[in-house]
Image (spheres, grey):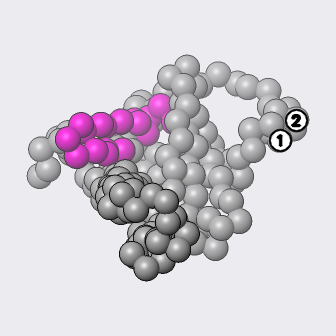
Amino acid sequence: MRSWLAPGEQVIATTRPHAGVLLFPAAVAVLLPSLVGLVMAWLESGHYQRWAPNAPALREPAVVVVLALAAMVLLFYPLRRYLAWLGTRYTLTSRRIVVRGGWLRRTRFDYPLATVRNLGSRQSLLARLWRSGTIALDMGFDGAASIKNVPEVAAFSNYTLEAIGELPHSALAPTEPQRVYADEIDDTGWEGMAHGGH
C-alpha cells in the first residue's frame, strides 16, 4: 500500500497534465538553436566586419552574450516547463483528489471528495481537440479549486462522480437547499455542471 493512502483508500486513476502544455516550450527548444545559428552566422568574422567595421573588439563579447542568453532561455523556459510537467501528478482515489508537484520544493493539495458539492469542466477549443480541460470543484464553505490541463477530462470527471457516488452517505458534506438562477450559471463559465452525488 502506498504510504500516503489512508486505510481502505484505493487509487482509481493517476496522470500527469496533458502533454499539450509542452507544445510551446518544445517549439522554443527547437527554433532557438536555429535562431542562434543565424545570429552566429551574422557574427562570423567576414560578415561582422562588413556591418560593424568600427567595432571589431565587440565581436567576441557579442558571441558570448548570444550564447549566454540562449542558454538562459532554454534553462528558464523549455527545461523548467518540462520539469514542472514531469513533476506534477493528478491522483484520484476513492476518497480525494491529490495534486502533487515540484522537485526541490514539493507541493501537495488534497481535495476530499466528501466536500465536493458541484463538479464542472471547462475546455478551450484547442483543449477540446486534445480532450483535455480544467476540472472545477465547488466545495461550498471550503472554497473552490481548479485542476488545469487534465487529460481525458470527461473520463476523469466521470470517475470522480462515480467515486463520490460510492461514498457512504454519512461521509458527504451536508448541503442546504439552494436557489440557482440561470444568469448565475451563465456567469460561472462552467460546462457540464453536475451535482456530486448528493
The label on residue 67 is none
Q: Return the x and y of residue 72 as percentages of the image width and height.
A: 35, 53
The crowd level at tag 2 (other Cα within 10 Å; few <14, some 14-19, many 20+) is: few
Q: Nearer the viewer, residue 79 or 57?
A: 57
Q: Residue at the spot x=53%, y=41% of the render? A: 146
Q: Return the x and y of residue 59 as percentages of the image width and height.
A: 38, 62
CB under 8 Å between callouts 1 and 2?
A: yes
The amino acid marked with disc number 1 is Asp
Give the quadrant of residue 95.
top left
Q: Which residues are magenta?
A: 99-117
Q: Looking at the image, how many numbered discs can be counted on the residues?
A: 2
Q: Is residue 86 left or right of residue 120?
A: left
Give the quadrant of residue 82.
bottom left
Q: Is residue 166 left or right of residue 64?
A: right
**Which residue position holds label 2?**
183
168 within the magenta span: no
Q: Nearer the viewer, residue 120 or 162?
A: 120
The crowd level at tag 1 (other Cα within 10 Å; few <14, some 14-19, many 20+) is: few
Q: Residue at the spot x=87%, y=38% of the render? A: 182
